[in-house]
Image: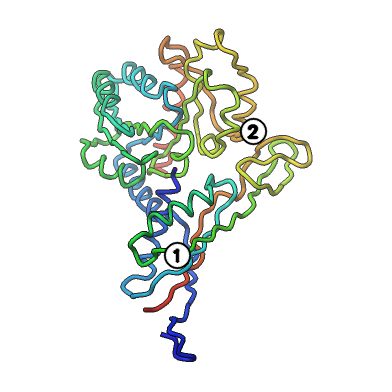
């Protein structure tokens, strides 16, 4: 209550906070990252447009690698566990996260999902984010690697339209490259736009459907996995 | 609509700052980098919704947008820009390496003690 003039209004005071937003997500993500590093588990946040073929790319990855290494997948979708069923059918372990009204996964959801997975040292963990080129770019999940999957039917200017997503990626995958002869998509233009946004990302063309470029995709993950392991022992 | 998640996060940060005091929130100010991908109007709307029925019900949210900075990948010039993507004023090349502009910071909370 105001003491000076009796106006009945409380005085207003200003508190300087100067704190980053999403600090609690960042702290949770760091906790996830430390926990996964302790188990030598490489986590890859797989983002991209709905329908670009993220799940198809995971299916073919699992088909090629399931004899040699354990692959775990956390599947994020607004609704249904259809993608988890596809991952299990391909031969890997999956945990579905239904985000409901949420348009992205966050670090807390990944933490909870990790508690439901049988983690073993050296596992490879894919986190398939909600298909969306906007929101997932903002939320660190505790991953080591971020990959973005897009396809020729979406047009060559996608990187310019969604800069934060492409800026955040270590790997940029153009899937469905078997469609290139059939759609008006200028590959040079697309590549130039990816480079403009992100000069350092590795760019890979794949067709999960036909198998093109899958070897290069696996090699890229292996390269990054090796530098991750070297980083751990350093 | 990641602004809804941001608004919830903002509310959490406000609650942690005020802790057990009875202070009522009247005004909140945040600053966001222009390249962060935040739509100020959406954030204000989401914040209004998240605040309903809380000590911040009816509080105003000011969002200050800060220009981003990039270094051109071709000519190396560092330049400021508004929006998600810049264009080098020297050579016209788009994008470049983002040096700043993706920050999101809770600056101040104005409260009235009850």
Q: Name the subunit of mark 2.
A: A
Query: Which label is found at residue A119?
Result: none
Q: Residue shown at 68%/37% (left/top)?
A: B73
In three-dimensional space, the C-alpha distance between marks 2 and 1, rounded to whole angstroms, equals 40 Å
Q: Are callouts 2 and 1 both on one chain?
A: no
Instruction: Name the residue at the bottom extreme.
Output: A4
Residue B90 image position (x, y, % from top left): 79, 41
Residue B22 image position (x, y, % from top left): 33, 75
Quadrant of the image containing the C terminus of chain B: bottom left
Mark 2, other Cα within 10 Å: few <14 / some 14–19 / many ≥20: many
> Which residue is the site of mark 2?
A196
> Which residue is the site of mark 1?
B59
Left or right, residue A24 beside residue A177: left
Mark 1, other Cα within 10 Å: few <14 / some 14–19 / many ≥20: many
Q: Residue shown at 60%/32% (left/top)?
A: A160
Q: Is residue A15 above or below residue A141?
A: below
Q: Residue shown at 51%/28% (left/top)?
A: A172
Residue A115 image position (x, y, % from top left): 22, 42
Q: Is residue A165 above or below residue A93?
A: below
Q: Residue shown at 42%/44% (left/top)?
A: A140
Residue A154 image position (x, y, % from top left): 53, 22
Q: Name the subunit of mark 1.
A: B
Q: Secondary structure at mark 1?
A: loop
Front-most of residues A183 and A125:
A183
Q: Secondary structure at mark 2?
A: helix
Front-most of residues A175 and B44:
B44
Q: Is residue B86 above or below residue B6?
A: above
């Amino acid at each position: 209550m105001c003491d000076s003039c009796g106006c009945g209004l409380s005085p207003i005071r200003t508190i300087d906070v100067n704190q980053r937003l999403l600090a609690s997500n960042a702290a949770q993500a760091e906790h996830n990252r430390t926990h996964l590093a302790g188990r030598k588990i490489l986590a890859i946040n797989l983002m991209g447009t709905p329908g670009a073929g993220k799940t198809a790319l995971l299916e073919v990855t699992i088909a090629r690698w399931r004899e040699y290494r354990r692959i775990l997948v956390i599947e994020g979708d607004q609704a249904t566990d259809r993608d988890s069923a596809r991952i299990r059918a391909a031969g890997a372990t999956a945990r579905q996260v239904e985000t409901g009204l949420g348009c992205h996964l966050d670090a807390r959801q990944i933490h909870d999902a990790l508690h439901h997975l049988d983690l073993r040292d050296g596992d490879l963990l894919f986190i398939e984010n909600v298909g969306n080129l906007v929101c997932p770019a903002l939320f660190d999940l505790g991953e080591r690697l971020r990959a973005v999957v897009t396809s020729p039917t979406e047009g060559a200017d996608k990187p310019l339209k969604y800069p934060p997503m492409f800026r955040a990626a270590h790997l940029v995958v153009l899937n469905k490259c078997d469609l290139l002869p059939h759609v008006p998509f200028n590959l040079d233009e697309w590549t130039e736009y990816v480079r403009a946004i992100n000069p350092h990302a590795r760019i890979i063309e794949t067709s999960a459907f036909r198998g093109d470029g899958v070897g290069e995709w696996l090699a890229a993950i292996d390269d990054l996995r090796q530098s991750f392991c070297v980083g751990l022992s350093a | 609509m990641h602004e809804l998640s941001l608004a919830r996060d903002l509310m959490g940060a406000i609650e942690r700052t005020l802790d057990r005091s009875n202070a009522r929130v009247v005004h909140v100010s945040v600053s966001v980098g222009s390249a962060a991908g935040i739509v100020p109007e959406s954030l204000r709307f989401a914040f209004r919704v998240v605040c309903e029925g809380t000590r911040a019900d009816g509080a105003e949210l000011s969002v200050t947008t800060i220009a981003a900075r990039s270094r051109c990948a071709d000519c190396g010039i560092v330049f400021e820009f508004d929006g998600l993507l810049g264009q080098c004023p020297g050579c016209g090349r788009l994008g470049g390496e983002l040096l700043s502009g993706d920050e999101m910071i809770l600056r101040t909370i104005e409260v009235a003690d009850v």
